[in-house]
Amino acid sequence: MGPHVVPVASDLACPAAADVVVVGGGIIGTTSALYLAERGLKVVLCEKGHIAGEQSSRNWGWCRQAKRDPREFDLIREALGLWRGMDARIGAATGFTTTGILFAANTPEREASFADWVKEAAGAGIHAQMLSKAEAAKQLPGDTAPSKAALWCASDGRAEPQKAAPAIAEAARRAGAVILTDCAVRGVETGGGKVVAAVTERGRIATSTVVVAGGAWTRRILKDLGIDLPQLKVRANVLRTSPVENGPIPALWDHDFAFRRREDGGYTIANGHVNVVPIVPDSFRFCLDFLPALRMEFASLRLRFGPRFFTEWQEAGRRALDEPSVYEAVRVLDPTPDTSYLRSAFAALQRRFPVFAGARIVQSWAGFIDATPDAVPVISPVDSVSGLVVATGFSGHGFGIGPGAGHLVADLVTGARPIADPKDFRLSRFFDGSRPRPMAGL
């Protein structure tokens, strides 16, 4: 099972109408609902399961600028500013704190790549630096084999995934939004090329705007509207430990492991380079689209054929909006973690940092990352359906950028000056011949 998430009670009544319906109660959906409600719109957020039930509670909790794709620079810079003021804004704790994040550079090629990144990031107002072996060791006391160099971004931080989106959802409700959990949106009604309603299992909500922030489900939702979003799932694995006294404060990514300190004194740990890609019917549909990403990440990806193929095959058919949907059949995606990868990462960490010798694994889980061919999100209106806005494809780094993405969604819906240029996040880039390529990976 996934981690325990702070529960958010559902509102009881399903409104007959709203200005905006947000589909999905993860970090993107809840921040979108918050910023839209703060602007005076009547917002209904619909979540088929519970708030932050899937990847928004299962991620590492990193809020990082380091090693970001340059196309995300402006948005992540603004997102970090929003994180720093979030607790005061919502009157609740998200667990955000600035700790700094290190990326180990154990090869000359990686060191050169990180040094180039530092120069490019500086042009976007993001301060980072390359550290020597001695400087990296100073940031992480107790490391018995520090890397020969490291990328260091001191202004990066962490938040607590199991409490952040729930706290933001409650703040959105206080701002006037209606929060409906265990309430799947079966589909979106359109007429004359425009959104006219969201049809939920509790009833129809008349609206002119729907924001689809459904994470790994978004392709399935859009497919029913004739929109062929290239999106695949990647299964990521995480464990958490018991509290560790005097453990390292900054987060670290290295080849064999990645970690960050948790608010409870334990650590969230993952394998630094292994992710599993289930082979599903869409794998063949989008093979050419994802080929550049596969080549770039080939050493880190494990392609697996299994039950997921047949599950998605059976789910593919369209259902009438007055019938139970696949979203009701699967309230929460809860894949089985690959414990062998996690245990090898934990063992490698214990060898490097003796302070972890007495730590024990308390829990492990997995989640599905919503990946796009260029590993950059889609935050965009849909040209063919007026009033439909998509926010998905965050490719494993949506939690940290979440407040910025939610703000940009609100800007696009209301016509306000966008917090960051949305050009690189447009959905049409996959259909207009641009064929964007990945730069930074998952």
Image (spheres, rainbow, N blue to C red):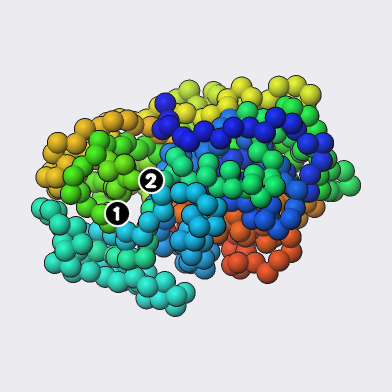
The answer to whether residue 170 is above or below residue 384 is above
Residue density around tag 1, few if under 14, some if 14–19, many if 20 or more, within 10 Å:
many
- Residue 132: x %, y % from top left: 18, 69
State which tag comes first along the sequence, 1 or 2: 2
Q: Is residue 259 visible?
A: yes
Q: Amino acid at mark 2?
A: Trp
Residue sitting farthest toward the right = 192
The answer to whether residue 29 is above or below residue 416 is above
The answer to whether residue 283 is above or below residue 20 is above
- Residue 173: x %, y % from top left: 64, 44
Which is more toward the observer, 288 or 20? 20
Q: Is residue 440 left or right of residue 216?
A: left
- Residue 234: x %, y % from top left: 46, 40
Q: Residue at x 36, y 60 (%)?
A: 98
Residue sitting farthest toward the front = 91
The residue identified by callout 2 is: 60
The residue identified by callout 1 is: 251
Quadrant containing the N terminus is top left
Q: Is residue 230 visible?
A: no
The answer to whether residue 252 is above or below residue 118 is above
Q: Is residue 344 left or right of residue 403?
A: left
Secondary-structure class at tag 2: loop
Secondary-structure class at tag 1: strand
Residue density around tag 2, few if under 14, some if 14–19, many if 20 or more, within 10 Å:
many
- Residue 412: x %, y % from top left: 69, 60
